[in-house]
Image (cartoon, rainbow, N blue to C red):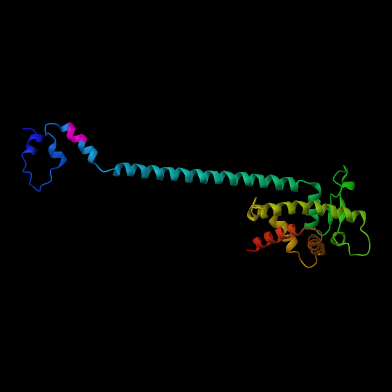
Amino acid sequence: MGGVARALYFPLESTAIVSFASLIDPDEPRLQQEVGMDLMPSSFDDLAKALGLLGGLYAFRVGLIQYRTAQQWKRAEWVAQEMKALFAEPLVQAALLMIDWQNRRVPLHPDEGEASKRDVYVSDELVAAALATHSRERPFSALECEIRGAFDRLLDGLERLNSYVTTGLVTDGELTPYVAYWASRVCGASEGETRLAALRVYMTTYGFAGALHLLERQAARTER
C-alpha cells in the first residue's frame, strides 16, 4: 500500500505529527530529493551573498588604494615640474646664489651673452642695502633695484607654493626636498649674514608673508 494510503489509516485522535515526508511514497526517491531541497535552510544562499559582499568590499578597497597611489604619483610629478620651472628662471637662480653666498658674482643680467656683462659682483652689505625698506633716506641705485627684482621673482614663486599648501593642493612634506635647504639658510642665518636678516624684514614688509611662513615651516621640519 502506498504511503498516502497508509497515512489515511492513522487514528484521527492521534497526537503524532505526520511529517510531510511520510506522505511521500518511498518508491519515489526523486520526489523525496526535491522536497528535501525545498526544506533545506537558505544558509548557503546567505553565505554566498556574504562572500559576494566581502569580495566587492575587497575589490573596492584595492581599487581605492590604487587610485590614491596613482594620484600621489601624479601630484609628486606635478610638484617636481613646478619646482623645476621655478628654479630654472635665471633671476631666481641669481636670488638663490645671493642667499647662499655672502660675496660672489651672480647673473643679474641673464640676457647678456658675455659673462663680464651678465654677472655682477655682490656682497653681503650690498644685498642687505638693496633689501632695505623705503624708510631709508637715499634712493635705491639701479643695481639695488635689480637685486630687489631678482628676489621678488623668487618670492613670488614661494608665495604661490604656500598658496598651494594652504588650499590643500600639496603638502609641506611634498615641498621639503626642494625648499628645506633654502628655508634653513634664510631662517637659520648666522649673526654676520645681514642680507638674510634684511630679507626676512623685506618679506614681511612687502607682502611676502606667505613665503616667509612657508620657509619657517620648512625650517621647523628640518630641525625635528
Residue 197 drawn above or below residue 91: below
Q: Determine the residue positioned at 55% across, 46% down.
A: 68
Q: How many marks?
A: 0
Find residue 76 and report its horizontal and vertical position in percent: 63, 47
- The magenta-colored residue range is 30-34
27 vs 224, left or right, is left
Find residue 146 and report its horizontal and vertical position in percent: 87, 52
Residue farthest toward the bottom in the current orientation of the protein: 191
Residue farthest toward the right in the current orientation of the protein: 138
Question: Which image quadrant: the N terminus?
Answer: top left
Find residue 23 and report its horizontal and vertical position in percent: 13, 37
Could you tell me what secondary structure mostly forms the magenta stretch? Answer: helix
200 vs 137, left or right, is left
Q: Determine the residue positioned at 8% across, 38% down.
A: 8
Find residue 138 and report its horizontal and vertical position in percent: 94, 62
Q: Determine the residue positioned at 65% across, 55% down.
A: 172
